Image (tube, coloured by chain):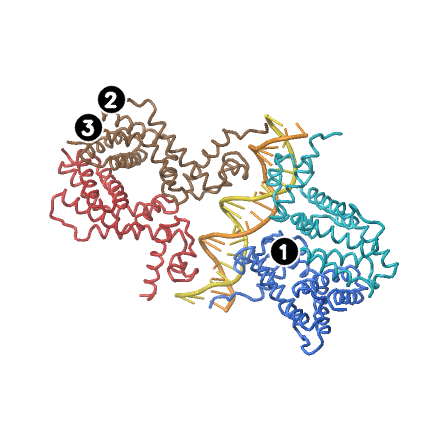
Chain colours: A cyan, B blue, C brown, D red, E yellow, F orange
DNA sequence: TATGAATGAGGATTCATTCAT
DNA sequence: CATGAATGAATCCTCATTCAT
C-alpha cells in the first residue's frame, strides 16, 4: 500500500546484487549495486537499512525462490522415489538455469554477514524435503540415515551434479540422471 | 648473510590467516593477520607480495596439507573399497580436527581472488583419489559414473558428513560410517 | 536534486594543491590538500578521481589561467614588438603576482605524473604567442629562428627574469625591462 | 684511503640514482636505486647517510661534472665572445650527451629536498662564467645587464636550445648555433 | 663492511552510510 | 521519496631507515 514503485526497485536491487555478488563476491560495493539497479546510491538504503540486511534478505529470497520452484507442481500422490526425483529434477533445473543465483546462495551461505537466524530460516524452506525423508524413514526405505543427513546429502549431491552439468552442458541430462541415481542408492534401502 | 627469511614467520602468517579468515571471511585485514602472527604490518609483505598472493598460497598450502594427510600411511594393497575407506577416514578426521582450515579452504575455493590456476593446482592434489576411481571404473565396481564425478561425490559427501560430525560431536563416529556407507552405495555397483 | 558538486570546493582543492605543492613538491599528500581545502579526505576524490588526475587538471588550469591573463586586453593593432612587449609584461606580472602558481607549473611540467597529452595541451594554450612569432617571421623581423624556438626563448627568458624579480623585488621593474630587451635582441633582426 | 672498493660503489649508486630519478622523479625508491647499483638495500646508507644526503650529493656531483666539462680545454686567450662560445658549445654538448643527467639536475634544482646551501654551491660552480660576464661588463660589451642576470640567461637559453636539439637531433647543430646567436645578441652591446 | 629482513608511519583510495537539496 | 555529494574510518601497500646476521 505504501511504496507504490517500491516493489520494482526492491526487486531491481536484489537482482543487481545477485549479478554483482556473483561476479565480485560479497564485497561488491553497494554503490555499484545501486547503479546497476538503476537507483541512486542512497536509495538502496531506503529499501534496505544496511548492506548486511540486504545480504540477509537476498539470501532468504533466493532460498524461498528455489523452494517455490521445487514445490510448484509437486506430485503429492507419487511414490517416495518419484517425488524425490521430481524435487531433484526441479532443483537441478533451477540451479542450471540460474547459475548466478546458485553461486550467490553458496557465497552467502558461507558468509559471516548472513546471520545464523537467516541460515536457519533458509533451511526451513526445505522442510518439505526433510519431511519426505522422515516419511521415507518411517516406511523403511531409508537405510537408517538420520533424515536431516539424508536431506543434506540430496542438497550436496545436487550441487555437485549441477557443477558438472554447467561444466559440460552437452552431458547435462546424463549427469542429472547419474546424480539422482547416486543419491537414491546412497540413501535407499537395498 | 643478513637475516634469512624465517620459515617460522611464513608459517605464522599462514596460521594467523587461517584463524582470521575462518572468523571474518576473506576480507580479514592484512594488518590484523600480521598482528596475530606476531609480525609487523609491513613484514607480511616481505613474505607475500600482496594479499592475493597470500590467499593463493594459503589455498595451495591447505590443499597440499590435506593431501599429505590423505596419502600418509595409504594402504596400497587393500581392496578398492578398503582404500577408499581409508582415504575417507583420513579426510574426515583431518577436517574435523581442523575445522578452521576446512572452512577457509571452502571460502577460498569460492573466492574470485584465488586464481583458476591455483584452483586447478589444488585439484591436482587429489589426483590420487581420482586415479583410484579410474581404476575402480576399470574393474567394474563403479556404476558407470564418470570417474571425476565419482571423486567429486566423495568430496562433497565427506564435507557434508563433517558438517554433521562437527554439529553433533557425540555422533561423529556414526556419521562417518553413515557417510562412507552412503558414498559407497552411491558409487558402487550393486 | 541532491547536493550539486560545488564549484567552490573544486576551486578550493586546486588552490590548496597549489599551496602545498609549491611548498612540498608533487608529493604533497592528498589528505593534507583536502584538509587545507576544508573538505574531507574522501571528498577530494569526488572532485578528482585520482591524484594523477588532480595534478593534470591543476596543470591545465594553471596554463589556461596564465593564457587568459595574457590574452586579456591584448592589443591587436600594435606593432609586433609592442604586442610582444604587452605579452611579456603580462606574463611577467602574472608570474610575479603568483609565485606559487609559477613554481607549481614548473614542477608539474617536469613531473612524470603529468601526461604528455596534458603537456601538449598546455603548449597549445600558447598558440597565440606562437602565431605572433610566425607572423613576425613572415615580416622578416625575426633573425631566422624557427618560430617555435623563438616562442620558447620568450618563455624561458621571462621565467629567468621573474626569478630575478622575485629575488630582488626592488629591482623588479628594471629586470623586467632588461629581460624584454634581451629577448627582443635575441630574436629580432638587427 | 679507507673504503677501497667504496669509490666504485659510491659512483655506482650515483649513476643508478641518475637513471631512476630521470625516469621516475625524485621519489624513486632507495631500494630500487641500490638494486640497480648492484648493492644491497642497506648498503646505500653506508655511502649516504640518508636519501636527502644522496640527493644533495648527486646534485653537487652533477653540477661539478658539468663544470669540469666546461672548464676543460678552456681557451683563456680568446676574445670574450669566443670564450663564451666555447663554454656554450661544451655545455650544450654535455647536455645533449647526458640527457638523464640534465633532467636530474633540473629536477633536483626544483626539489625542496635539495638544500639552499647545495643550490648556492651549485651556482658557484659557474663562478667562472659569471666572472666572464663581469669582465665582459667591465669591457663594455654587455648592454648593461647585471652580470649574474646575463649568466642566468646563458644558462636558460642553453637549456632551451638543448630541448630543441634533443627533439630534432638532425637540426642539432643548427639549433646550437641559433641558440648562441640569440644569446650573444641578447647580451652583447650592439 | 655487506646484506636484506624487519619495522611502522604514511599514502592513495574505497566504501557504507548520512544528509542537504 | 529520490538523489548523489560528503564523510572519515578502514584498507592495502610502499618506503626510508635500522639492525641482526
Which of discs 3 and 1 lies nearer the camera? The answer is 1
Q: Is residue A163 visible?
A: no
Q: Residue at x 83, y 61 (%)?
A: A142
Q: Residues within 10 Å of mark 2 (few under 14, many from 20)?
A: few
Respond whether the residues carrying marks 1 and 2 are from the same subunit.
no
**Mark seen at residue C139:** 3
Q: Residue A122: x percent and y percent?
A: 76, 48
Distance between the Cα atoms at labels 3 and 1?
80 Å
| Rendered position, A123 above or below B119 | above
Q: Are marks 1 and 2 in contact (CB under 8 Å)?
A: no
Relative side of B161 to B36, left or right: right
| Rendered position, D163 above or below A5 | below
Q: Quadrant of residue B181?
A: bottom right
Which of discs 1 and 2 lies nearer the camera? The answer is 1
Q: Residues within 10 Å of mark 1 (few under 14, many from 20)?
A: few
> Mark 1 — residue?
A170
Q: Are marks 2 and 3 in contact (CB under 8 Å)?
A: no
**Mark seen at residue D2:** none
Q: Residue B92: x percent and y percent?
A: 72, 66
| Rendered position, C79 above or below D164 | above
Label 3 is found on which chain of the structure? C
| Rendered position, A70 above or below C172 | below
Label 1 is found on which chain of the structure? A
Badge 2 marks a residue whose secondary structure is loop
> Mark 2 — residue?
C78
Q: Quadrant of residue F8?
A: top right
Q: Residue at x 55, y 66 (%)?
A: B6
N-terminal of the pair, mark 2 or mark 3, is: 2
Q: Nearer the viewer, residue B144 or E11?
A: B144
Q: Residue at x 38, y 43 (%)?
A: C111
Relative side of A34 to A157, left or right: left
Relative side of C151 to D28, left or right: left
Amino acid at each position: 500500500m505504501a511504496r507504490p514503485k517500491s516493489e520494482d526497485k526492491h526487486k531491481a536491487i536484489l537482482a543487481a546484487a545477485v549479478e554483482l555478488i556473483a561476479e565480485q563476491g560479497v564485497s561488491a560495493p553497494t554503490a555499484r549495486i545501486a547503479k546497476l539497479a538503476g537507483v541512486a546510491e542512497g536509495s538502496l538504503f531506503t529499501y534496505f537499512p544496511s548492506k548486511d540486511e540486504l545480504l540477509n534478505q537476498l539470501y532468504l529470497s533466493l532460498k524461498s525462490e528455489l523452494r517455490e520452484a521445487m514445490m510448484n507442481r509437486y506430485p503429492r500422490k507419487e511414490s517416495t522415489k518419484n517425488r524425490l526425483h521430481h524435487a531433484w529434477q526441479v532443483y537441478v533445473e533451477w540451479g542450471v538455469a540460474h547459475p548466478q543465483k546458485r553461486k550467490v546462495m553458496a557465497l552467502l551461505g558461507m558468509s559471516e554477514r548472513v546471520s545464523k537466524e537467516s541460515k536457519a530460516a533458509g533451511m526451513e524452506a526445505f522442510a518439505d524435503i526433510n519431511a519426505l525423508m522422515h516419511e521415507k524413514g518411517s516406511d523403511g526405505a531409508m537405510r537408517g540415515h538420520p533424515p536431516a543427513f539424508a536431506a543434506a546429502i540430496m542438497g550436496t549431491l545436487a550441487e555437485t551434479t549441477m557443477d558438472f552439468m554447467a561444466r559440460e552442458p552437452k552431458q547435462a541430462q546424463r549427469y542429472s540422471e547419474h546424480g539422482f541415481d547416486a543419491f537414491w542408492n546412497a540413501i535407499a534401502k537395498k
